[in-house]
């Protein structure tokens, strides 16, 4: 079989190139690329400077003093934290924990919720005449 003959052939590594690329050539290519890149960067920067002069011929303006509520059309005021919901919730929780009048003329009061739950669980009757327990 011909497959057996090929498997017995020992491969040799190819010989090294007798004329390798010199380090000076590689350095020259890199230096040339950097020069071209620098040329394009400077050209782009110059174009941007000309465009800026065209768009704003008076030159850059100094910004107004910070601390004002509005600079040009930008509102610079700090955002205030809206705490109305927290305050209302705290007032409601406080009302659930204290005694007070619902309607003084009618003699209707409110009692702390813990006390009301104790009265409901113990089976104490609720008085409608405004008197104490």
Image (cartoon, grey):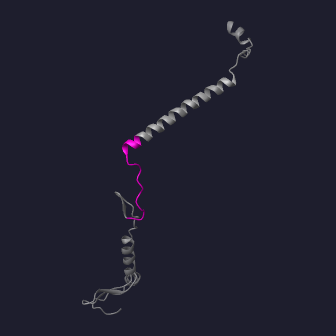
Q: Quadrant of the C terminus?
A: bottom left
Q: Choose between 50 and 15: the one closer to the eye.
A: 50
Q: Quadrant of the N terminus?
A: top right
Residue drawn at x 65%, y 27% is 27
The residue segment tinted magenta is 51-68
Q: Position of residue 71 (x, y in %)?
A: 37, 59
Q: Position of residue 4 (x, y in %)?
A: 71, 10
What's the magenta bit mostly, secondary-structure-wise?
loop
In the image, residue 131 sits, relative to residue 35, either above or below, namely below
Residue drawn at x 37%, y 86% is 99
Residue drawn at x 37%, y 81% is 95
Quadrant of residue 55 within the rendered picture: top left
Q: Position of residue 92 (x, y in %)?
A: 36, 77
Q: Residue furthest top?
A: 1
Q: Residue furthest left?
A: 105
In the image, residue 113 sits, relative to residue 60, either above or below, namely below
Residue drawn at x 70%, y 10% is 6
* The stretch drawn in magenta includes residue 116: no
* The stretch drawn in magenta includes residue 53: yes
Q: Choose between 6 and 89: the one closer to the eye.
A: 89
Q: Choose between 101 and 124: the one closer to the eye.
A: 101
Quadrant of residue 105 within the rendered picture: bottom left
In the image, residue 77 sits, relative to residue 122, either above or below, namely above
In the image, residue 10 sits, relative to residue 25, either above or below, namely above
């Amino acid at each position: 079989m011909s497959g057996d003959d090929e498997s017995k052939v020992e491969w040799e590594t190819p010989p090294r190139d007798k004329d390798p690329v010199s380090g000076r050539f590689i350095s020259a290519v890199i230096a040339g690329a950097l020069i071209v890149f620098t040329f394009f960067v400077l050209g782009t920067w110059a174009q941007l400077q000309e465009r800026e002069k065209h768009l704003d011929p008076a030159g850059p303006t100094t910004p107004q003093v910070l601390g004002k509520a509005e600079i040009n059309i930008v509102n610079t005021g700090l955002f205030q934290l809206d705490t109305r919901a927290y305050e209302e919730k705290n007032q409601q929780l406080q009302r659930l924990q204290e005694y007070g009048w619902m309607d003084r003329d009618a003699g209707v009061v409110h009692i702390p919720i813990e006390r009301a739950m104790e009265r409901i669980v113990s089976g104490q009757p609720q008085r409608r005449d405004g008197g104490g327990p």
